[in-house]
Amino acid sequence: MSAPYSGYANGKLLITGEYLVMYGALSLAVPLTVGQSIRVGRGAEPGILHWEAGDPSGTWFTARIKLPDLEIIASSDEKAAAWLTALLKATRTLNRSFLSDADGIQVITTLDFDRYWGLGSSSTLIALIARMANVDAFSLHRAVSDGSGYDVACALHDKPVLFRLNNGIPDIRQVSFTPSFTDQLYLIYLGRKQDSSREVYEFRKKKASGFQKETDEVTSLSDKIVRCNNFEEFSTLIDRHEQIMSSVLGQVTIKEQLFQDFQGSIKSLGAWGGDFIMAATASGNEYVKRYFAAKGLEVVFPFRSLVKSTDLTPGK
């Protein structure tokens, strides 16, 4: 690459359809106000790709990669380096000219959020590399991930999306998600990052045909939730969603596990047992902050502050 390049991709949260999205359930996914940026320029060492990745805590990963072979020379994290080179090599299969010369290159990526929060550090990078290489982001995603790709859709779109897989092909429809009760929704980090790839692998062992009824109901719930403008109805819908997934996964809901006395509804987002949850309550900001602080959970966001485009005109 001779010309400098820069780009940005959105983080993500899956509001409905976790797990069953992989089997065709309609799911509501939202891009976030935080994401990842990339800057690419000429490096100081010919034949070397120098990679540096950071988040709000500072630089967390560095690597020196031989060009054009895309082989690791040195890195600060072997697992991260292996994933990165797999991603770069997969990109090369889609675009043979990608990083094919021996010029020195420097890449700096920066997350707006803590990399442990599970808000899309991998999916944003897939989207950024796909754009940089001028290849299809979903083709690249399929080459390196077993997930549905909803997270890549969020990385590429600035509005909430209704996402589903039709015979493995993403079907994406941008929507407005503008409930009148947005200020009664909160996003809370549980402090236990899940390994999404492992969760997907374990769930795929289950018999998909056995979940057709649940997939159909979650599809219906997703459609109702995105249209809902009544707080009590919304709470009932997300409670029902939790009950369905509790049955599918054979796990008690997160509210039953940890938050039985919470004044409102709580829904898991993404892999159960970690990352973020959504709380819906009419009890107000101070109640939410005090309640979760008493549980040792200090990372609490008003929904509107973290989710993009919640105030769009419907249909735009």
Image (cartoon, rainbow, N blue to C red):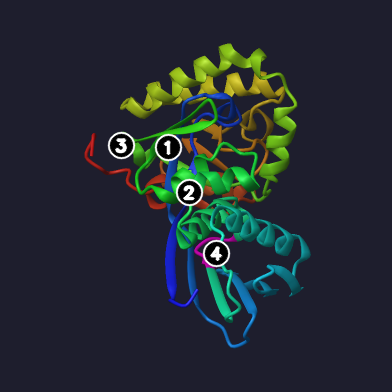
Which label sits in the foreground, 2 or 3?
2
Label 3 secondary element: loop
| Disc 3 from disc 1: Cα separation | 25 Å
| Disc 2 from disc 4: Cα separation | 13 Å
**Label 4 Cα neighbours within 10 Å, binned few <14 / some 14-19 / many ≥20:** some
Mark yes or no: residue 252 visible.
Answer: yes
**Label 2 Cα neighbours within 10 Å, binned few <14 / some 14-19 / many ≥20:** some
Label 2 secondary element: loop
Q: Looking at the image, do the residues carrying marks 2 and 4 touch, with CB atoms under 8 Å apart?
A: no
What amino acid is found at the position of numbered circle 3 in the picture?
Answer: Ser
N-terminal label among 4 and 3: 4
| Disc 1 from disc 2: Cα separation | 45 Å
Residue 168 position, x and y percent, is 55, 30
What amino acid is found at the position of numbered circle 4 in the picture?
Answer: Phe
Q: Is residue 131 left or right of residue 271?
A: left
Which label sits in the foreground, 4 or 3?
4
Q: Which residue is mark 4?
A: 98
Q: Which residue is mark 1?
A: 283
Residue 46 position, x and y percent, is 62, 85
Residue 144 position, x and y percent, is 64, 48
14 over 204 or under it: above or below: below
Chain part drawn in magenta: 110-114
User: Which dot marks residue 136?
Assistant: 2
